Amino acid sequence: MIVSYLARLILLLPEITTADANKLADIAERSTASHSTSQIPRQPAAVTPDIAVDRPYKHRIKNERNQWPPPEAHSIVEQHHQGPKGCLPINETLRKNLIKDIFNEATYDKNNLPSANSTNVVVELTVQSITEISEFSSSFKADVWFSQIWHDPRLDFTGYNYCLSNISLSSHKLPQLWTPNVCFVNSKKVEIHSSPYQNILLLIFPNGTVWLNFRVNLQGPCLLDLTYFPMDTQQCNLVFESYSYNTAEVRIIWRHWEPVSIPDPNSKKLPDFELVQFTHRKQTLLYTAGLWDQLEVIFVFRRLYGYYILQAYMPTYLSVFISWIAFWIDTKALPARITLGVSSLMALTFQLGNIVKNLPRVSYIKALDIWMFGCCAAIFFSLVELAVVGFADKLDAKRRRVQRAQEQLMLRSDSEQQWLARMSFHRSSQMGSDSRFGSDAEMNPPVVLNHATTIMDAKKPPRSRGVSIEAPEKMTIKKPKIDVPHNVNGEKIDEISAKLFPLAFMAFNIFYWFYYIGMSGTGR
């Protein structure tokens, strides 16, 4: 059983040796004395994320160009099985006694620190997957491997000279062990995976180096900013601190090489987000109880707005275009034009409601709000244009009625003038035939007809007879000239609007997309 276990472990972790564990202990001691992280050199495999859990796929990625398993694997297995020259072969009884001696209450007290000075704890984070980013809760969910590595001289068992490179313990031994209690201080929820047992890796190397690894599912906070939604970027962070010990007792540091890693590139892509970068930093904060070391890792996500192009922008484009169809409909078909405009406005409002209900109630204006307001304004002004067209047609109809009434009045006046002229000519002919009875021209002056003569005056018979009046064929009746002002009708307004509205909407699109896509590319 032990041989098979060691064979499996060595095939996955070919660099782990007892000498490397001893080097790690020396590094931890030097770091404790100097409180400097620069003393930790890049070790080949003493504390790499490859040994945190059983992950053969990552090792295959590293050795995809080489033969698997490597040719030297068999010699490594033999070396670990035999151990150093002169070591004692391990068996179940010796292993049981060794664990009992290590955790002897007489020599080991979990309430005491490993050293009188501050203990350096190396922290490493490996992101297995990021599953969700929620705008409602301003958080993200991820599965991570979280490692804590420190040196405890009380757990040193090199004096036993066993053929054993390390001891792997189950999670039920963890309560008997002193731990630095490094935790996610800003997490909203953390759960250790149980599949079916708790995924906790506890390794103790012969020199007393302890490697504690948890596979957890956590929910961390995000600094939510939807100003540029849906072309926005979001920052999510995780903060590590030793919850129980300040800097006088525990100093936490990032691992010198690859402190934060994401082995699987597919883990960077979510359905609606993409991880563009992640950074880490360290700082020391002052609390009431003293100074605490704080480690922080920041994840930057960029939203993939293809979904919103199809579900939000394209339908709004169609609503605006449908509202413009009214410009080509006859101005007299007001019910059809009103139906187009109102239906487009209602569809746009319904679309905005579907999008907003999936977002938190923020008090500032988002990029999508500006787009929706611009589209609503385009449809609203098309309805205003419809009202202007209707009002212009109303004024034009009223002007035409007045003009038609004036023309009818003039025609009536012309007919009456002609009738009077004929009557006067007939009367003059009668007076010409009676001229032999005498002329009384002084008593009856001739009647002069013009446009100013009223109908009643024209009906008065002449007082004298024998008056010579021109025949109606030779009479010229001047009609009054009516000045008709040049007014813009509804058809002219529709013709101008059919060109002006698309140009204005195109200008709005150019400004909107260039500005927000440019801001999204710069990352603000």
Image (cartoon, rainbow, N blue to C red):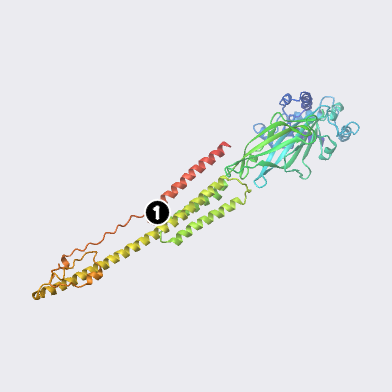
**Residue at horizontal 44 percent and vertical 49 percent from the top:** 502
Where does label 1 land, which residue? Answer: 493
**Residue at horizontal 44 percent and vertical 61 percent from the top:** 334
Q: Nearer the viewer, residue 229 or 85?
A: 229
Which percent across, then down, holds residue 273?
61, 43
Q: Nearer the viewer, residue 321 or 335?
A: 335
- What element does badge 1 sit on? helix
Please name the amino acid that badge 1 sits on: Ile
Q: Quadrant of residue 181?
A: top right
Q: Quadrant of residue 19?
A: top right
Whether residue 496 can be seen here:
yes
**Residue at horizontal 75 percent and vertical 35 percent from the top:** 241
Which percent across, then down, holds residue 270?
63, 43
Question: Which quadrant does the C terminus fall into?
Answer: top right
Which percent across, then down, holds residue 141?
69, 43
**Residue at horizontal 21 percent and vertical 72 percent from the top:** 460
Extreme left residue here?
436
Q: Quadrant of residue 155?
A: top right
Q: Nearer the viewer, residue 382 or 115?
A: 382
Q: Nearer the viewer, residue 32 or 176?
A: 32
Q: Is residue 453 left or right of residue 138?
A: left
Whether residue 165 can be seen here:
no
Q: Is residue 390 left or right of residue 358?
A: left
